[in-house]
Image (spheres, helix red, strand yellow):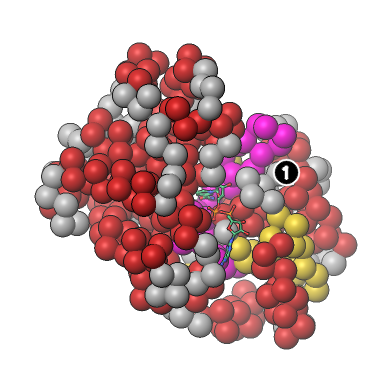
Amino acid sequence: MVEEFIYRQPVKIWFGAGELRKLPDVLSELGITRCVLVCDRFLAGRAEQLKAELPEIRAVFSDVEANPQLSGVEDVVTLLRETESDGVIGLGGGSTLDTAKFAAAIAKAPGEAIEYFRGKRAFPAAGLPIVTVPTTAGTGSEVTQVSVVSHGREKKTINQPVFMPKAAIVDPTLTLSVPPRTTMNTGLDALAHALEGYWSRNHQPISDLLAIEAVRLVLENLEAAFQDGNNLEARTNMSLAALLGGLSFALPKTAGSHACSYPLSEDYHLPHGEACAFTLDSFVRINADARLELLCQRTGMRKTDYLADKIQYFKELAGLRTRLSDLGEVDLDKLCRDCAAHPLMQNNPVVMDEDRLRRMFEALR
Ligand code: NAD
């Protein structure tokens, strides 16, 4: 029997090859007349080109770093205040979108970004409207109210309604230039979102359907996108998978493999997608009883073991790290302690205490 649930998805999504050309319409629909475009260095040229074409773009901030730092948020806030902007565009991967979302949220409010990061100030109910334009197919940040930002080595996932974008333009052609390894990392991030949204303790029927379709799309298209970056069909399906993956975890939130990804990124410097993928196949086996048989039937996998093996195959194909020995010197006690203590671990359908995590990691020696 279906239990009570509330489903909400407030982002207007413009999807399709070439949809970036609709940016002026999207800005006008949102009443944005002066804005800052946020990106990283790779997209600086494209951003300047857009600025030359669109009078609404008053400034470009192109210094976002991977695993974005709070200092980047502060710089964008300063620029937004200086230009008296009434909107923000984030053009890039998850690092860029998360920076833009955080800055848009607080630009009109008093105080500094660090006060919000530390929880010393409450986030405002409304910020500047933000348009997200993802250029990787992975994080789903274009449709979530999540921003992941670091201050020094302290990486925080902040979940606030004010971070929710007003519009997302998902144009798969923007992902054609993503290099193979990043394609695999980000594609496995999308897969992790869908699987974790599905097996989350807070899963619900609409999110489940989105998750199943996202998993199917990843399983059928990730290898093709990895092998040939110019394969627009595979890229389009991966952009859709990432979008559906984002929608599928937005309400239920993620679980075990994401909980483990934080210590793996912070202490062993794995990029986000690779860090999630490191334990994802282990969690497929551990969480097998969390209705995974049904998901496997609907995604052509037949058995949960096949799904786990496929994830391992993807990782090996791209030369991602799969064993503890690939991480250098590992402090296993600390790793298990930190993974067990992460709040997202509470969301895992199987209780994972330090002992159980140790057994999982021992099997990865
Ligand atoms: P990223 O944004 O850090 O980008 C990775 C690399 O890919 C960068 O070097 C970037 O320049 C490059 N790149 C981006 N687009 C490109 C393109 N079209 N062509 C060539 N290169 C391109 O990576 P990501 O995986 O998209 O984002 C990771 C970040 O997102 C992490 O900080 C993670 O914690 C966060 N995240 C956020 C959410 C959320 O809901 N907010 C969800 C998952 C992950």
Residue placed most toward the observer, 228 or 33: 228
Residue at which label 1 appears: 70
Residue placed most toward the observer, 311 or 74: 311
Q: Amino acid at mark 1?
A: Leu
Q: Quarter containing ligand 1? A: bottom right
Residue 114 image position (x, y, % from top left): 76, 38
At x 54%, y 22%, the residue is 329
Residue 133: in magenta span: yes
Label 1: element kind: helix
The answer to whether residue 265 of the structure is visible from this angle is: yes
Residue 101: in magenta span: no
At x 43%, y 27%, the residue is 324
At x 64%, y 57%, the residue is 96
In the image, taking residue 47 as reference, residue 9 lies left or right, namely left
Where the N terminus falls, by quadrant? Answer: top left
In the image, taking residue 299 as reference, residue 21 lies left or right, namely right
Point out the stretch of residues depicted in magenta.
Answer: 128-157
